[in-house]
């Protein structure tokens, strides 16, 4: 399955402030040069009806939404990351193997838990959509197929709040009418080149002589296009390897040296990091704090323990100690604060080591 959250940044904003839900919502990256310079990050589907989409200039979006009661908001990546983390944990719990790609997409290998049964997979996808909606109040679109390539295209076909299943026997009929642009790796340039060869649809690509494709695009890409057009893909859903550290950073409402204010935010981040650790089944041995000062200078302090732990209270206590000590030594004001754990070990690894050490006598 490929799960893709709908109009993600804009939907996060709607969740935070449901009053804007029926209006066009445009999330912007302001460059800061002039009031409206910058680009649109994403927009909700109401705004998309007016032609507003990712990448266009904010000024153009404003023109398209002239005389419309629209909402323009600056990106708040920290908030979206938080929502994303929580949703990814829900998704992970429904997969045999899990691979997050980007902030709002993930592949779920559900082969075993559905026993390759599509009605089962459909039920599972419905459950996932319900879980995400009930627990995190967000909609997503899901594509289900025999491999990652097909699942991804399936998820894109029906949006927002879509669910599209493509069974193995339907792959050919599903893909063949689609424009080649739908295939991952086919951009504007490739699309043009293929068009000069008389190839517009995936089906035409599938029937096109593979040797000629290789002549035009090279062996690697030519072979890939040929296989992709037939829905052939055997890329496994790849669990990402263990992270070296888990950290979160966030901007304070205003610059401050007030320990209580700093800790209030830092503890929230600790909770966030801790949840992630638990989910990954990891223990930490080192704790670090970050502080970006008003002048944008970056400061950090760390402490390393003898033994790995997953304890949240120890984490918070150490963060407090480190901030206290840092503020005692320096006179900067904090603009952004962050926390990090590192020297991570897997819980099972530790248990194995202990068992080996004491023998398996129980
Ligand atoms: P997408 O999944 O491409 O788009 P989306 O979630 O906004 O909309 P859809 O319903 O079509 O899936 O991107 C995920 C987020 O990444 C998006 O909410 C904002 C961000 N993004 C940018 O900041 N700039 C961009 O050009 C794109 C494409 C996305
Ligand atoms: Ca999305």
Image (spheres, grey):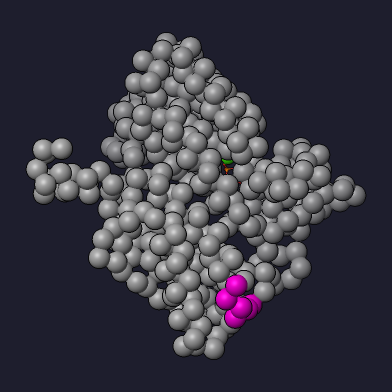
Classify residue 84 as left or right of residue 120: right
Quarter holding the C terminus is top left
Which of the two residues, 319 or 124, is positioned nearer the viewer here?
319
Residue 212 in the image: state x and y as whole percent.
Answer: 33, 30
Residue 4 magenta-highlighted: no
Classify the position of the N terminus by image quarter.
top left
Residue 256 included in the magenta stretch of the image: yes
Q: Is residue 108 above or below residue 55?
A: above
Position of residue 13 measured from the top left corner of the image (x, y, whole percent): 70, 48
| In the image, residue 294 above or below residue 352 | below
Residue 15 in sight here: yes
Q: Which image quadrant for residue 163?
A: top right
Q: Is residue 284 above or below residue 358?
A: below
Task: Say left or right for 215 vs 292.
Answer: left
Instruction: Give the residue drawn at x 55%, y 51%.
Output: 82
Residue span colored magenta:
255-260
Viewer can see residue 157: no
Toward the viewer: 333 or 294? 333
- In which image quadrant can residue 127 be found? top right
Instruction: Classify residue 69 as left or right of residue 141.
Output: right
- Ligand 2 located in image quadrant: top right
Q: How many marks?
A: 0
Residue pictured at 51% horizontal, 47% vertical? 85
Is 225 situated above or below 69?
Answer: above
Residue at the far front in the pictured view: 362
Q: Position of residue 19 (x, y in %)?
A: 81, 44
Q: Residue at x 41, y 30 (%)?
A: 95
């Amino acid at each position: 399955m490929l799960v893709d959250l709908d109009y993600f940044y804009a939907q996060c904003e709607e969740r935070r402030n449901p009053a804007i839900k029926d209006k066009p919502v445009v999330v912007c990256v302001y460059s800061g040069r002039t009031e409206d310079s910058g680009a649109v990050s994403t927009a909700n589907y109401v705004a998309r009806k007016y032609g507003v989409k990712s990448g266009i200039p904010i000024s153009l979006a404003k023109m398209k939404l002239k005389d419309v009661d629209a909402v323009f908001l600056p990106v708040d990546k920290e908030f979206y990351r938080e929502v994303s983390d929580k949703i990814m944990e829900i998704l992970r719990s429904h997969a045999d193997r899990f691979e997050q790609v980007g902030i709002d997409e993930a592949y779920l290998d559900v082969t075993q838990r559905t026993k390759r049964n599509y009605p089962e997979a459909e039920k599972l996808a419905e459950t996932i959509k319900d879980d995400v909606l009930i627990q995190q109040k967000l909609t997503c679109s899901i594509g289900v197929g025999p491999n990652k390539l097909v699942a991804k295209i399936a998820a894109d076909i029906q949006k927002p709040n879509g669910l599209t299943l493509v069974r193995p026997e339907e792959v050919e009929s599903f893909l063949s009418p689609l424009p080649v642009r739908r295939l991952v790796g086919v951009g504007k340039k490739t699309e043009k080149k293929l068009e000069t060869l008389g190839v517009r649809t995936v089906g035409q690509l599938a029937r096109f002589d593979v040797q000629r494709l290789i002549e035009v695009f090279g062996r690697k890409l030519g072979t890939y296009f040929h296989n992709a057009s037939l829905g052939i893909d055997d890329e496994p859903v790849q669990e990402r390897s263990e992270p070296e550290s888990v950290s979160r950073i966030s901007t304070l409402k205003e610059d401050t040296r007030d320990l209580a204010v700093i800790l209030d935010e830092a503890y929230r981040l600790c909770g966030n990091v801790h949840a992630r650790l638990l989910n990954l089944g990891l223990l930490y041995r080192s704790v670090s704090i970050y502080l970006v000062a008003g002048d944008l200078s970056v400061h950090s302090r760390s402490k390393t323990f003898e033994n790995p732990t997953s304890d949240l209270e120890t984490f918070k206590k150490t963060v407090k100690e480190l901030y206290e000590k840092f503020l005692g030594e320096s006179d900067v004001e904090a603009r952004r604060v962050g926390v990090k754990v590192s020297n991570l070990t897997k819980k099972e690894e530790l248990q194995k080591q202990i068992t080996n050490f004491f023998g398996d006598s129980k």
